[in-house]
Image (cartoon, rainbow, N blue to C red):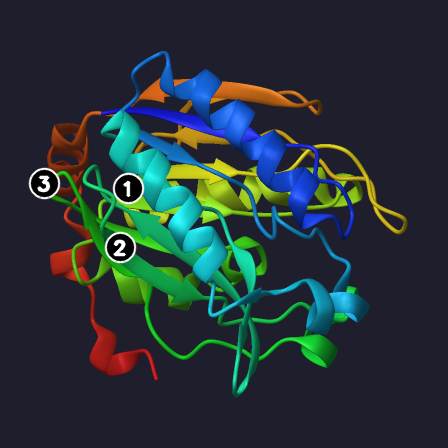
């Protein structure tokens, strides 16, 4: 499976500009015929949280229509990063996943809200797992701060997830954490990690970039720099099965003693 990660610089609080930029990058990436594309976190608005009531996507419908059409046009799977999704009960940080026919394959709202960037003041946390299937592979969607919670990641891989798709706006000062956490999640879950971060800056933060794909042994297949970039790599799901057979951590777990 060939996967392309679209490491975008996001225009702060300007959804219209971001849709235009994302469409350009998606079409550019799609021309190389990947099986799947992934976008970063909150790519339509950035962290303009104080204005989300005004600029969030009502029911995520604008994003759904936009990404569904591109997935169907190119016949590719798209993990559409995450967007501010305005619903009656509040605004969530939601990831939408589309299959090759443009149908909605999965949806996940960020479970762990990051207090250091005031998410808890403006967003509602999700409550459901992020499992979905792409081309017959069981995958899981996670968003940024979620990777600091290994028990949440394991809740997905214990059910058989073989690929973790992670969208993020991870700041540059904690780049070493980003790399270490992603590699750890790949090794301890014996799965592929496909992590798409944003590039650039907003009024309060400089972001790290360094989107990457990591294999089930923790080896980095490809890694971006700090600037805008389309990064591509190939994963082989048979390797997940071989690694899990070689070191059978899932059958050796003793969850009855972990509470």
Residue 154 image offset from top left, x and y in percent = 32, 62
Q: Evaluate whether residue 187 shows in this view.
A: no
The answer to whether the residue labelled 2 contacts the one labelled 3, judged by CB atoms less than 8 Å apart, is: no
Which residue lies under the disc numbered 2? 104
In front here: 42 or 118?
42
Q: Is residue 217 left or right of residue 251?
A: right
The answer to whether the residue labelled 2 contacts the one labelled 1, judged by CB atoms less than 8 Å apart, is: no
Nearer the observer, disc 1 or disc 3? 1
Using the image, determine if residue 231 lies above or below residue 141. above
Furthest-top residue in this view? 32
Residue 112 image offset from top left, x and y in percent = 55, 71
Q: CA distance from mark 1 to mark 3?
A: 12 Å
Marks 1 and 3, the one that precedes in the sequence = 1
In front here: 123 or 241?
123
Q: Residue at x 28, y 30 (%)?
A: 73
Marks 2 and 1, the one that precedes in the sequence = 2
Q: Residue at x 19, y 25 (%)?
A: 236
Q: Which numbered dot is residue 122?
A: none
Residue 44 image offset from top left, x and y in percent = 62, 49
Marks 2 and 3, the one that precedes in the sequence = 2
Mark 2 Cα-neighbour bin, 10 Å: few <14, some 14–19, many ≥20: some
Which residue lies under the disc numbered 1? 191
Q: Residue at x 76, y 39 (%)?
A: 172
Nearer the observer, disc 2 or disc 3? 2
């Amino acid at each position: 499976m060939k996967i392309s990660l679209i490491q975008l610089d996001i225009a702060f609080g300007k959804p219209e500009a971001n849709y235009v930029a994302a469409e350009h990058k998606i079409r550019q990436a799609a021309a190389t015929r990947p099986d799947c594309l992934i976008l970063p976190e909150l790519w339509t608005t950035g962290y303009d949280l104080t204005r989300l009531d005004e600029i969030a996507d009502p029911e995520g419908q604008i994003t759904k229509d936009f990404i569904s059409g591109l997935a169907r046009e190119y016949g590719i799977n798209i993990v559409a990063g995450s967007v501010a999704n305005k619903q009656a009960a509040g605004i969530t940080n939601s990831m939408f996943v589309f299959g090759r026919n443009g149908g909605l394959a999965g949806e996940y709202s960020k479970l762990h809200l990051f207090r250091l960037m005031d998410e808890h003041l403006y967003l509602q946390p999700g409550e459901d797992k992020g499992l979905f299937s792409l081309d017959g592979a069981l995958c899981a969607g996670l968003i940024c701060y979620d990777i600091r919670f290994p028990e949440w990641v394991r809740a997905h891989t214990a059910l058989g997830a073989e690929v973790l798709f992670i969208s993020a706006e991870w700041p540059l000062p904690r780049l070493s954490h980003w790399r270490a956490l992603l590699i750890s999640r790949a090794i301890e879950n014996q799965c592929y990690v496909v992590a798409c971060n944003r590039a650039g800056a907003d009024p309060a933060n400089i972001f790290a970039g360094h989107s990457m794909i990591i294999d089930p042994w923790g080896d980095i297949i490809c890694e971006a720099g700090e600037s805008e970039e389309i990064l591509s790599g190939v994963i082989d799901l048979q390797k997940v099965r071989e690694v899990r057979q070689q070191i059978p951590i899932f059958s050796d777990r003793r969850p009855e003693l972990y509470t």
